Amino acid sequence: MSEQKHTTVRVVRGAANEEPYEEAFDVPYEDGASILDALTWIRSHKDSSLAFRYSCVNANACKECMVLVDGKVDYACTARLNEGGVTVGPLKNKRLIRDLVTDIVPPKEKLTGGEQS
């Protein structure tokens, strides 16, 4: 029986109006595992306070797991873990709520037009 492989997932954490910090987690590594798999493992086995968003059970809410993976915007559910480790952070162009959760609701559009009589 072979020994379980591991990799490091570094997560940029914090809340709005706080200085962000990076926390490293040693997670099991399997070929084909996603970043979302690693985040749910961390939440279940290491730190239940880790905040991230996903909604895989409802295709209408897809895109909720969008994060920065090694500095590039990606979906946590499709981005793959790397044996050499990975850094996951919140989207930079959205308002931070906590950890990897950002305000993904589009800004309200202002409707302009003439007065109706």
Image: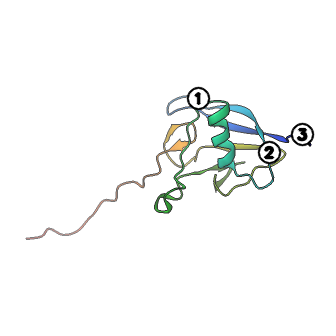
Q: Name the mark on residue 45.
A: none
Q: Secondary structure at mark 2?
A: loop
Q: How many marks?
A: 3
Is residue 57 placed above or below 52 in the rendered structure?
Answer: below
Q: Are marks 1 and 2 in contact (CB under 8 Å)?
A: no
Which quarter of the rendered picture does the C terminus lie within?
Answer: bottom left
Q: Quadrant of the N terminus?
A: top right
Q: For marks 2 and 3, give the one nearer the viewer.
A: 3
Q: Within 10 angstroms of label 2, few (less than 14), some, or many (20 or more) residues?
A: some
Hey, which quadrant is residue 52 in on the image? top right
Residue at the image point whose x is 75% and y is 49% from the top: 81
Residue drawn 58% across and 47% down? 91
Left or right of 101? Residue 81 is: right
Q: Mark 1: few, some, or many residues within 10 Å (few <14, many ≥20)? A: few
Task: Determine which residue is flagged by label 2.
Answer: 29
Question: Which residue is at the far front?
Answer: 1
The residue to which callout 3 is attached is 3
Query: Label 1 is placed on what type of residue?
Result: Glu
Secondary structure beneath label 1? loop
Q: Is residue 115 left or right of residue 101?
A: left
Estimate how packed mark 3 is, as few (under 14), some (14 to 19) or many (20 or more) residues with alpha carbons within 10 Å: few
Quick check: 43 above or below 104? above
For residue 104, side relative to residue 85 (left or right): left
The residue at which mark 1 appears reads as 19
Locate residue 102, reporting x and y percent: 51, 44
Residue 71's spot in the image, x, y percent? Answer: 69, 49
Q: Position of residue 103 (x, y in %)?
A: 46, 46
Looking at the picture, which amino acid does disc 2 mark? Tyr
Q: Identify the mark nearer the N-term, 2 or 3.
A: 3
Q: Nearer the viewer, residue 78 or 107?
A: 78
